[in-house]
Amino acid sequence: MERKDDEEDDDQENLVAQSEPMRAAFQMEDVNDERVNTRGFNFSFNKWCILAIVVPVVIITFYLTTDVDNLFRIEVMNGNYDVSVNSMRESELQALYLLRQQELGLSKLWSSTLLDNSSDSTNAFSSVLFEELKLDLLSQISLNKQIQQALLSSHQLGNLLNASDNATDTSVDGYGGLRRCRKVEYRLSGRRTIEWKPKSDKYLFAICASGQMSNHLICLEKHMFFAALLNRILIIPSSKVDYEFRRVLDIGHINKCLERTVVVTFEEFAKSRKGHMHIDKFICYFSKPQPCFLDDEHVKKLKSLGVSMNKLEAAWDEDVKNPKPRTVPDIMTKFSLDDDVIAIGDVFFANVEKKWVMQPGGPISHKCKTLVEPSRLILLTAQRFIQTFLGGNFIALHFRRHGFLKFCNAKNSSCFYPVPQAADCINRAVERSTAPVVYLSTDAAESETGLLQLLLVVNGKKVPLVRRPTRNSNEKWDALLYRRGLEGDRQVEAMLDKTICAMSDVFIGSMGSTFTEDILRLRKDWGSASHCDEYLCQDSRPNFSLGLSQLDSQKQGIPVGFVPGTFDCEEPNFAKNRSKHRNEPTTMQKLKEAASSRLKKSGSKAARLVVFPIRGRNWCFSQTIESLQSEAHSSNTPSTFKDLWKKISSNSKHNSFNSNLEVVVDFASNKMNKAWSNLEKAPAGSLKNKIHGLGLRLLSRVKPSEIFLKSIPKEVTRVDITYPSSLNGRLVRRRLRHIAMRGSIIHKKYFYGSVTLLPLTSFFMVLPLPNIPFFWVLFRTYSHWRALQGSENLLQLVTNNSDQQKSDKGTTDKTNIKDDPQRTKGCSSPPWVLKPSEDLQKLIRSGEANDGLSEPTISDICKRFNLNTMDVVKYKHTL
C-alpha cells in the first residue's frame, strides 16, 4: 500500500498544469491588455457609422425606383387570386364543352361528304344540301369564335384587356367574305311584263274598301295591273273616301318610271272633267257577301264628291271567302269595255295571275326598281333614322299584336305566339345574322315589349330593341316631316316603319299580316331581301292557344295548343262548338275521336314520329308502336288468290297498273309474313327453326333507318314530330329531309340491285333444299321498295308545306283566306306538326353519358313514347 501511494505522488509531480500560461522571454502583459480594449471601441464606432450611412441610401433608392401604387395593386390582385383562378377554370371548362360540340358538328359535316356522288341521282341531292352545308359550316365558325371569347374572358381583369384585344385575326371578319345572311339575287331582266300604254280618254276608277292601309296599297297595285291590261289611266281615290295616298306614296314616281301619265289623282281627274264626273260602268269583282264589298256609307261618300254612277253590276259569281284563280283572258273578257270611265270593285282578294303579279319588280314593264314606293320625304327620314340609331347592320322585326289574337285563333293553325316563344325565335335569328340591334315595329303594349326585351339575350349579352322615339327638338332625323306638318300622322308613321324595315339586313315578319307582305314586296324590289328573312317562328306552332290547360290536355291525351277547329270543322255547328267547348277537355276529346273516325273513313292516316339524338351525331328516328299497329290493321289486303283476282279485276276499271301491282306486292308480303310466323313456331332443333335463327341474324344487320322509312307508307298524309324541346324545329325538319333524301337515293340503288339478283338466285331451286338465297333477295327487294316509297312520302310531307307556306303567305287580313291546295275545304291540317317535348328533354338530359344515352334511359324513352326498343338501340351502334 505504501508503494502504491508513493508512485501516485511521483506521477503527480511529473504532470504539467494546463491552466498555467507559457511565459515569454520578455514580460508584455500590461501592454497587450490596453491594445485589446482600444480595438473593441473602434470596431463598435465604425459599425454604427456604416449603418447610419447605408440605411438612408437604401430607403431613398427604394423610393425613387419603386412604384408604390403598382406594388399595392399587385397585393390586392394576389388577395383575389382564388376568384380569378376559379373564373379561369370555369371558362376553360366551358371552352372544352364548346370544343366538343364543334367536334360533333364537324364530324357531321365530314360524314355528309362521304356520300357516293358517282351516280347521277345524287346530283340533285348534293345541290339541295349545298346551301345547308354552307350554313352548317358558318355555324361551326361562329362556334369557334365563342370558344375564343370563352378562353379570353377569364383574362379580362379590370381594364387590362379591352374588347378589341379579343380579336384573334382581323382577316377573318365576316367569315372570310362568306355571309350567312346574303342578299337574294333576283333576275329582274328576265321577268314577265306587260306594257302600260293607256289611252288619254279612258279611265279606271280604283275602289278599295277592305282592311287598313296595307290592304288598300295591295288593292291599288292590283288595280294598276288591271289598268295596264285594259289600257286605261288609273284614278287614285280621294282622301275623303279613302286614305290620303299623296302623303305616303310618290305618285309622280310612277309616271316617271313609265315616262308617261298612267296615274292621276282624283283632283286632277275632276279638273280635267270640269266637275262632270260620271262612272259609266261600275263592275263588282266579287258578288258575295255583298256586291263590290261596299256598304251604303262608302257609296254616299262617292256621291258627295259629285261622282254619279249607274247601278252596281257583278262580273261573275265570286265569293270573297273562296276566290277562284283567274287569268288574263278572263279579265279581258269581262272588263274590256268602250266606256270612258269604269270602276272595278275591291280587288284585294282577287286571285289573278298570282305568280305574275307577285314577282319581284311587279308585272308592269318600267325602268325603276319598283313602281309603288314611299314618298321622298319618308325615304329621307328613314335613312336619317337608320344613320342615327341603327347603323348598317340591324334586324327589323314586325311584331303584330293588337287585334291579332282573335284573327289568329280563328285560323286552323294559330299564328299568335306567346312572348317567351317569340323571344326564343328572335334570339335564333339574331344569332344567325350576328346583328347587334333589332328595330321593333309593333302595336304591342309596353308590358309585352318590356318582357320581350328582357328575354332577348344572345351569348350572354342583351340585344337592344329600338323603337322610334317621341318628338324631340334636339334630334334632327325627323325634321323634314316636322316642318311639313306630317309629324304624328298615323299613316305616315306606318309607312316610315315599313321603309325602315325594308332597308334592314334581315327582316322578321308576322305571318298573315299584309303590313309584313308589303315590306317583303319592297325588299324584293329594292334588292334588300335576305336569305335569312322569315316569318316569326315559321317552323313551329304556338306552344299554347285557346286557353287549354296543360294538365287537362295531359289527362285527356290532347296535345297542348290543340285547336278544336282542326277537328270539328266538318260539323255544321263548327264555329259555335269551337267557342263553346274549347275549355272542356272531355268534349274536346270526343271531338277528337269523331275527327279520327272521319280521318279513317277518308283513307288518310297520321304517323307519330319521335326524333332525338342518341349518341353524338347519331339521331334516332322511330315511329310509335300504336301507329304501326293502326297501319297494319287498316290494310285491306286480300288473303286468298280468289280475293286477289277479284280485287285486281275491280280495280282495273278505275285504277292504273301501279295500283294493281301494289296489291300483288302486299299479297305476297302477307304470304311471306305468314310463312315467317310458321318458321317461328317450329320446334327447337328442327330445320325450320335453324332457318328462322339464320333469318334473325340476317335481319339484325338491317339498318334502323330502313325500318323507319318502311313504316311510312303512302297512305300517311300527316306526321306528328315529337322531339326534345331544346332542339330547333328547323333542325329537326332538316334532319328528316336529309334521311328521306338519302333513303330515296340509297334504296333506289339497292332495289334495282336486288331485282337483278332475283333471276340468278332462282337457279338454286333445282337443289332439293329450301332456296334461302332467293327468298332472302326477294325479301330485300320488297324491303327496299317499301323504304323507297316511305322516303319519297316522308320527303313530300316535310318539304311541301314549307314551300306552300312561303308561297301562300301572301296578302291576307281579317277575312283573307289563302289559296291552299292542302286545304280544299278550308279545314285540313298541315302535313307535318312539330311537337317539342319537355318530358323527352328531361329523359335525355338525365341519361347523357360519354358514349351517348345509357341503356336504362333508352328503355325509359321507349316505354314513355311507346317505341320499339330493339330498333332504337340499333341507332346507337350504327355508324
Image (cartoon, grey):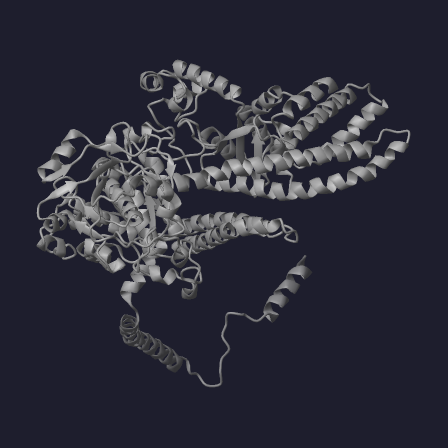
- In the image, 830 versus 696, the foreground residue is 830
Left or right placement of residue 691 versus residue 187 in this view:
right
- In the image, 686 versus 132, the foreground residue is 132
Q: Is residue 21 visible?
A: yes
Residue pictured at 25% horizontal, 44% vertical: 338
Residue 179 image point, x, y percent: 42, 57
- In the image, 452 versus 188, the foreground residue is 188
The relative height of residue 558 versus residue 610 in the rendered view (above or below) is above
Left or right placement of residue 368 versus residue 638 in this view:
left
The relative height of residue 518 versus residue 21 in the rendered view (above or below) is above
Residue 464 image point, x, y percent: 27, 48
Name the quadrant of the C terminus: top right
Q: Is residue 161 visible?
A: no
Left or right placement of residue 8 versus residue 823 in this view:
right
Residue 614 image point, x, y percent: 57, 37
Which corner quadrant of the image does residue 55 belong to? bottom left
Residue 69 image point, x, y percent: 27, 63
